[in-house]
Image (cartoon, rainbow, N blue to C red):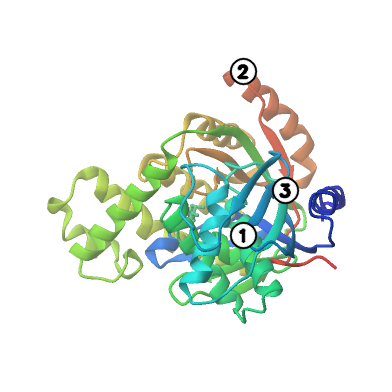
């Protein structure tokens, strides 16, 4: 865990609010495979990482308002608990406000509070800094005010905050992984039952690295919501609850009733769901070559069928393919920017990093960032 970050957030809280806080760490996540399958009731394969959000939280004596402080941005917002409404689109405040509103929607009562937070994953990296923030707020408030919420309740509150305050109709993967992560494990999550099976990740000679394009293209939120509604409408044409219940054969039967673009999107989801399950089997068998191929195939589908990639991500995956020691690479998260995840032979990591950094700089005249991450436990109190 990032001790400098913890120190910085604790100190900011103490200096601003003159009391001792409760400290919470809520991790971001990676996703090995299973992208855009979560809101189709399908399978995903995420893991919490040792980067995320640190929050300091405490009760406030104020009769009128609560205060949230975004330490990195040096921005503060006053929250009036009996007059909540979403703030401007795209502002961090909606993650906090949304969680508070969704707690109240469950008829739970909280008093005024102060919170200060900061993180060590950049927003837009596709590593779920937003879910980490939501989870840290709901977890902290649950502790402070003894709300009796289970972790399952908390992730649903975080997800609703994102739907209703942030305006992204996200699935449950990010909030789940961030809350339920297990050190050194990835979780094969069935997004219908919201139950997961942990897989110990020890690739021996290989490792996972992330390469951040450092871009976040606009329209990603609306494109996300559009994809979701295409999936839902095709599921309803097929008279199934979600695309998870459909086969390629089923989809074929309505081919002439949907546009070729939407057909490809639904086909991608059906195939990606199968890839996630196959990936878990490959992992169980220690078959990293097959896992890598599935990862490359996932990117191909995200790029060409689901159309949520971008030039920068495609370029990074192409560079990976040039290197026989990278078994698989793909964009990760919602898309239109953020990171690729790469399964690479450890001895090759240093030279691949140098190669890809230079190639990216030459191509786009900007830097990419490369991270190694450790798989970590989910949201919890920092002792
Ligand atoms: C975002 C959403 C998730 C999931 C991914 C794509 O991260 O928050 O629910 O849909 O995109 O797999």
Would residue 177 appear left or right of 114 to someone viewing this image?
left
Residue 68, placed above or below residue 187: above
Residue count near mark 2 (Cα–Cα under 10 Å), binned few <14, some 14–19, many ≥20: few
Of 128 and 67, which appears nearest the observer? 67
Callout 2 secondary element: loop
Please give the residue where the numbered disc 2 appears in the rendered image: 365
Where 182 falls versus 232 (above or below)?
A: below
Circle 1 SS class: loop
Q: Residue at x 55, y 68 (%)?
A: 155
Left or right: residue 250 compared with residue 150: left
Q: Position of residue 135 (x, y in %)?
A: 62, 63
Distance CA(mark 3)–CA(mark 1): 25 Å
* Residue 315 shows in the view: yes
The Cα atoms of the two marked residues, 3 and 2, are separated by 29 Å
Q: Report the disc number at residue 118.
A: 3
Quarter of the image where the C terminus is located:
bottom right
Element under disc 3: strand
Instruction: Give percent across and percent down for residue 75.
Output: 67, 41
Q: Which residue is mark 1?
A: 64
């Amino acid at each position: 865990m990032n001790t400098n970050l913890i120190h910085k957030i604790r100190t900011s809280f103490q200096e601003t609010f003159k009391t001792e806080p409760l400290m919470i760490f809520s991790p971001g996540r990676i996703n090995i495979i299973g992208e855009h399958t979560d809101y189709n009731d399908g399978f995903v394969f995420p893991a919490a990482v040792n980067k995320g959000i640190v929050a300091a939280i405490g009760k406030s004596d104020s009769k009128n308002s609560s205060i949230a402080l975004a330490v990195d941005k040096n921005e503060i917002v006053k929250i009036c608990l009996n007059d909540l409404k979403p703030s401007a689109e795209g502002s961090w405040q909606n993650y906090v406000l949304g969680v508070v509103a969704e707690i109240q929607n469950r008829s739970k009562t909280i008093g005024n509070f102060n919170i200060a937070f900061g993180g060590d994953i950049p927003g837009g990296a596709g590593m779920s800094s937003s879910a980490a923030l939501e989870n840290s707020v709901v977890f902290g408030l649950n502790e402070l005010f003894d709300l009796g919420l289970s972790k399952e309740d908390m992730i649903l509150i975080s997800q609703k905050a994102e739907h209703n305050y942030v305006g992204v109709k996200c699935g449950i993967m990010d909030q789940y992984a961030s809350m339920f992560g297990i050190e050194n494990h990835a979780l094969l999550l069935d997004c219908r039952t919201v139950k997961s099976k942990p897989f110990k990740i020890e690739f021996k000679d290989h490792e996972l690295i992330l390469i951040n394009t450092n871009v976040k293209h606009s329209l990603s939120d609306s494109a996300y919501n559009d994809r979701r509604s295409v999936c839902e409408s095709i599921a309803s044409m097929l008279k199934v609850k979600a695309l998870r219940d459909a086969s390629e054969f089923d989809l074929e039967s309505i081919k002439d009733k949907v546009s070729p673009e939407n057909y490809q999107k639904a086909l991608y989801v059906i195939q990606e769901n199968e890839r996630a399950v196959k990936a878990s089997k490959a992992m169980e068998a220690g078959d990293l070559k097959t896992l890598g191929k599935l990862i490359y195939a996932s990117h191909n589908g995200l790029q060409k069928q689901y159309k949520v990639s971008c030039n920068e991500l495609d370029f990074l995956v192409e560079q990976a393919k040039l290197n026989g020691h990278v078994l698989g690479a793909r964009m990760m998260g919602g898309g239109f920017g953020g990171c690729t995840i790469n399964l690479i032979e450890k001895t090759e990591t240093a030279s691949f990093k140098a190669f890809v950094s230079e190639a990216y700089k030459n191509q786009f005249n900007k830097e990419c960032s490369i991270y190694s991450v450790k798989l970590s436990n989910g949201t919890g109190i920092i002792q």
